[in-house]
Image (tube, helix red, strand yellow):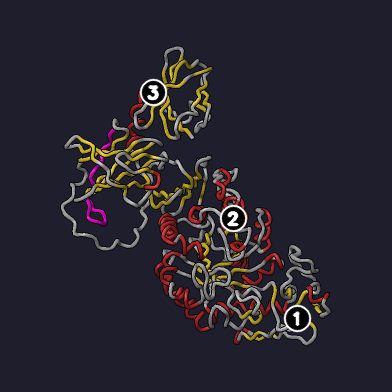
Amino acid sequence: MKKKLTSFVFQLLFAANLCAQAPANAPDIMLQGFYWDSFSSGEYGATNWNALKSQAAEIAATFSMVWLPPSAQAEGGSPTGYHPKHWCDQNSYWGSMSELKSLISALKDAGASNPTGHCYAIADIVINHKAGTSWLDLMDEDFGSYGYFNLHQNGYSDYVCRDDEASRNGYDCRGNNDAGYENMCDAWGGYCAARDLDHSNSYLRSAIIAYMKWMKGEMGYNGWRYDLVKGYLGKYNKEYNEAAGAYYSVGEYWENSYDALKHWVQETNYTSTVFDFHMKYEALNNALTYGNYRGMASGYAVPIGIAGADEMKRYATTFVDNHDTFRDHNRYNGDWTKANAYIISAPGIPCVFYPHWVRCKDDIKKMAAARYACGINSQSSCTTEGTCDRFYKCTTKGTKGTLVCFIGTGWLAPSGFTLACSGDGWAYYTNTTVPPGPEPGPGPEPGPGPEPGHTKYSVTLNHNTKFDAVGTGEKDFQGRDQYMASVYINQGDKLSCFDNENNVDWTISRIDPYGKYQCFDSGYEVTCNTSGCYDVYIKLAWQDDVIYIGEGTNCQTVAVAVAEASEGSIDNFAMFHPNPARDVVTIEGDEEAISAYVVTLAGQSERLQVTQNQVNVSNLETGVYIMNVTYAGGRTAKSKLIKL
């Protein structure tokens, strides 16, 4: 019995170790802390060790892992580091070894401020190939207490694949043929810019293991990004992961194929995550770039890619671009903020590219705060039900709450959720509290404001429908009183403000340059250009009166419309098809429909022509309506209709 118990415990420990670098329910968000040749300068700033250290506190507050570029000494023709010459020499174009240690230490210390409690440095491990001082002159590696390895052999090499291009140039390569998954150039072996290493050689594998243990123990790294894993068999990544140990591992298997990515993870015996190239190409490059929102969701109502599959999401590291894809036709050419909203709201471990961080920093901070607040992790349950031609919708359930992501236009705020953050064409809603950002700077000394809940003004649509604006009891950052009404506004509606005490409209001097003001034309009457739910803040000042229009959270007009329709049936999608609709709607049922009209959520009505139980709604503006139908037998019914 004791022997069986010991064996069982060993099996549990072994199973846990297998997945140690694809952590279960990982809450992490990673930053790729560089782009090509950004060690000295660049359009998005330098990212050498000292430059990143100066940002350590800010980075660690949002990211729990930072992927650093290859830090080993590399040949001069590849200063970014992807042709390493000397693994044990950590002085590179990015900075000195001591500066690197200082950066890793600074990230670790600052990680206490991250919601996960850590900020780990992830090493870029380039072991598919190695440069020499000349064709076969590989350098010896001295890892101190972790081992010394003599890789230099005069005139020949046991560690370079025999089908490497060096062979056809007359050099004596004695390793086995390259066992990679594909031939990447016109030589016999895989990679044609440095010597392909023979991972079947046990001595070489011992050197790689010592290198990784040294990187963790001496340098302070706690994770691995494996470069070009197509160049050698995945079973070797399993061996390296299990021997070196770390928090996290990810492989660069550059292939737009769910099956190929899954196969590589299986080859590692599930000891590593993999970059989700399938999501990058299909959901982002080929769909979001062109506003194809339906194309951003799979046929199973989940995000596209391995991050959408229940059995694989744990092993997905999602991303928009990296140092390689950003430089050529593989680059994502759409809106960066929307693309990052996609990956940060999905399962898997999102990896944000440094240029995107620089350009979209405020939005990415808010997205990350919402993800952390909801407790979303790599294995969170997720569905894209509700995605349509106008917008992508993703609902992800975390351990602390649920996050609903919208990308596109024309969505309605989900019931029971609060707007956490938003921008042009995207929004996050949550059902939990998201910690606020930094406190605003000091403004003018506030005067007495309205009592909370006191109604003094109304938001008026088309001069005939008024919605009370309730005093918030707060001042804005300029010290002005605030009143707010949450209103569903259809495209073309005229928005004005009404003084309930004096019974007159007042002139809107200007729209405050914040929020979703670009969807409205300013003037005495403000014209809505895009239908949607909006929070309209009325701000009163001594010299001018302004409004601030932001994403709505709880439109009172929706409640009004539902109440008006309560005498009939509100079946929500059951009475008509298709619903949402663009042109012709079929009225379901055995009875003949003889008349129909729609009522907007602002109270306007319009009669429609009914022909053989079909109604043409193509002339209606995009928005939400209550359709009223009268049947030949006298029965009436009402139901919500969404016009696309």
Question: Which image quarter is the N terminus in?
Answer: bottom right
> From the viewer's perspective, is residue 224 above or below residue 617?
below
> Residue 394 magenta-drawn?
no
Disc 1 residue type (three-letter): Trp
Residue 256 left/right relative to 415? right
Label 3 close to label 2 by CB (< 8 Å): no
* Mark found first going from the N terminus, 2 or 1: 1
Give residue 568's mark: 3
- Seen at 51% across and 31% down, the residue is 581
Q: Residue furthest front?
A: 523
* Mark found first going from the N terminus, 3 or 2: 2
Q: Tell me the element at label 1.
A: loop
Disc 3 residue type (three-letter): Gly
The residue pinned by badge 1 equals 135
Q: Badge 1, how many Cα within 10 Å: few under 14, some, many 20+?
A: some
Q: Can residue 232 be seen in this view?
A: yes
Give residue 109's mark: none
Q: Tell me the element at label 2.
A: helix
Q: Nearer the viewer, mark 3 or mark 2?
A: 2
Give residue 280's mark: 2
